Image (spheres, rainbow, N blue to C red):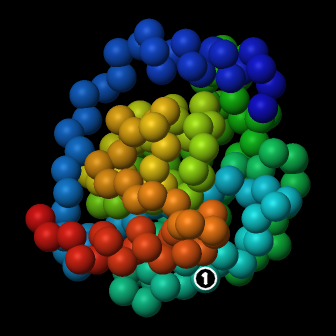
Amino acid sequence: MHKIKELAIKWKLNNKNNENVIHENIAFDKATSIGILFYEDINIDFSILENFVKKIKLEKNFVKVLVYTSEIKNIETDLEITIFNKKDISIMGEILNQEVNNFIEFNFDYLFCTYNVPFPAFDMILKKSQAKCRVGIHNVANADNFELMIEKSTNNDLETSLNQLLYYVKVMKN
């Protein structure tokens, strides 16, 4: 992402009063809607996301996936996904893609973030999200963006971390 866009997003996060959204924990067995944020990267096997979504869809039929790509491209998958990239963010850090804005405004029961390092676009989405419970992989810099975080797996394996996230939301009681 362009440095000016990153700075604009960071400035907005630090200086703008974000809507006061009440986030809460909800028992996973009572959840009806799941959102997933995924950063598509050449170093990450996209089948990890596909397998994660399939596991969730065994129990939940409403799953929306938002994928950020560092390059402008289509992703071949059977999943129903919304793709966005740097062109969908204005120079002032505003989201230009209405589908992304709809994702942010949707009242998910759970929003899973699969990226474990600070990324300004995801930080902004998480801050603005109407999701009841935001879960992700621990990172000190974005700890206030989540109601539940886990430590990344010892071998830094995304698939293991996602399986752990799913396990903990399932055993968490409201």
Please, is residue 146 above or below residue 18 in the view? below
Amino acid type of the residue tagged 1 in the rendering = Asn
* Residue drawn at the location 25% of the way across and 28% of the way down: 20
Residue 122 left/right relative to 171 = right
Please, is residue 165 above or below residue 163 in the view? above
- In the rendering, at what x and y percent does residue 54 appear? 54, 84
Residue that carries the numbered disc 1 in the rendered image = 51
- In the rendering, at what x and y percent does residue 72 appear? 87, 47
SS of the residue under disc 1:
helix
* Residue drawn at the location 40% of the way across and 59% of the way down: 150
Image quadrant where residue 30 sits: bottom left
- In the rendering, at what x and y percent does residue 71 appear? 87, 47
Q: Quadrant of the N terminus?
A: top right
Residue 63 left/right relative to 78 = left
Residue at the extreme top of the image, as rendered: 15
Residue at the extreme front of the image, as rendered: 154
Front residue of 77/144: it is 144
